[in-house]
Image (spheres, rainbow, N blue to C red):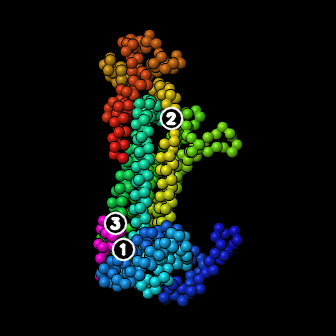
Amino acid sequence: MNSNSPIRLDDKLPGNTAANRQWGGRFTAGPSAIMQEINASIGFDRKLWRQDINGSLAHAAMLAHCGIITAADEHAIRDGLAAIAAEIEAGAFPFESALEDIHMNIESRLTERIGEAGKRLHTARSRNDQVATDFRLWVRDAIDGLDAQLADTMKALAGRAAAHAADPMPGFTHLQAAQPVTLGHHMLAYVEMLARDRGRLADARRRLNECPLGAAALAGTSFPIDREATASALGFDRPAANSIDAVSDRDFALEFLSTAAISAMHLSRFAEEIVIWCSAPWRFIRLSDAFTTGSSIMPQKRNPDAAELVRAFTGRINGALVALLTVMKGLPLAYAKDMQEDKEPVFDAAEAWALALAAIAGQVRDMQPDTARMKELAGSGFATATDLADWLVRALALPFREAHHITGRLVAAAEVAGCTLAELPLATMQSVEPRITSDVFSVLSVEASVASRRSYGGTAPERVAEQAARLLAQL
Ligand code: ARG
């Protein structure tokens, strides 16, 4: 191997002269170093160790219950697996890449420890149903953890929303000042997004929660197993109904990743707003030292790196989704080794998503909004122009389209005069539309504007306070 190669196979793995201890019966020699390197998944699938042990415990208990192995063997297996769990937890487990994956590492170690009984564990089971079960269990645990994090992030946002239900800020479309909204209302928009992410996770979990164990390699087994027993012992709703599908389906991982991608997209939008909001020309919020970094050259800098990284994590997470969709596309039934490539994208995306949620929840709690500045800017850019047009409709019974036109001329007049709409003299307004009265000024302030938007789901402080209270009660 070229010494510039990123992996140095000849140093790392001498190549095995002996056949694999788990399946080497008909093999006379071991795999080449390259074969071992490309084949082994232990470097990443060791993450599944807990699920693998739990799956094996359920399987062994079922085998004993069905009279397929003896109670004594099951006992020995249980003790052996408990000892292995302790060993892994203590960092003392001798992981071997010659044993390919977590399943064979644990099974081989079990046999080393308990002898004969360990060799009976794999009765009526294949690594195909084993890995499908382990991976489902892992994704299910990840879903539960991420669901709790989503709820926590929503709580942080809704709490802030309740506190800022009446604080105006500019509302944007096209990133141009559109209409004043309240900061609380803006934050609750994200709470709604994250609530839907939780809904998607719950849906994914419901469909995921079927147990592949007992599908064996692909066709089921000739042993009189009890699939209901293993399914319920592992907290699944039922056994998967088709053994071929059970070992070859990775929809559950794809649904997890697509939910991750959508949620990461949501988080990236908020992250982008954090970046904008704390930049110098805006100064809507200030982040403390806890969520910023300094520059090595520009002493004045306070960079929102955490928000920028959350914004960037979408790349990694979308990549994971596309990677697994691509691995699965066109794969004939049932299992193929391609499917070993299902794990790293899921592990990586889950980790990035969890970190992104933690960083967003942390920044929501950390940020100090400059409510005075937000309010000041809420009135800039003629943001109450729609209120003026609405007033013309209400007070003068003008059709909205006409009111819109007149308001446009008033905005142009204010632009020429270099003032806000509220500062435009009544006489100037009347030169555009003589029927305008001084009552118009009652709708031109930022407070009046937000207070008037009382429609359900609108930005009026009372509506925002209601929604925040509803969401906080739910959480
Ligand atoms: N490490 C493998 C994977 O993750 C386990 C299943 C192997 N099955 C097989 N028939 N080679 O997919």
The label shown at residue 22 is none
How busy is the neighbourhood of tag 2: few (under 14 within 10 Å), some, or many (20 plus)? some
User: Viewed as shown, does residue 474 lie left or right of 316?
Assistant: left
Q: Earlier in the sequence, mark 1 or mark 3?
A: 1
- Name the one closer to the observer, 420 or 131: 131
- Identify the amino acid type marked 2: Pro
Quadrant housing residue 451:
top left
Q: What is the x, y in percent for residue 363?
A: 51, 44
In the image, what residue occupies the spot 50% across and 28% down?
Answer: 372
Residue 406 lies, in percent from the top left, at: 40, 19
Number of marks? 3
For label 1, the residue is: 58
Q: Which mark is residue 369?
A: 2
Give, as a single range, the part of the protein colored magenta.
Answer: 220-238
For label 3, the SS is: loop
Which residue is at a point 57% across and 41% down the rendered structure image? Answer: 288
Picture coordinates of residue 97 (x, y %)? 55, 76
Can residue 69 be seen by looking at this rendering?
no
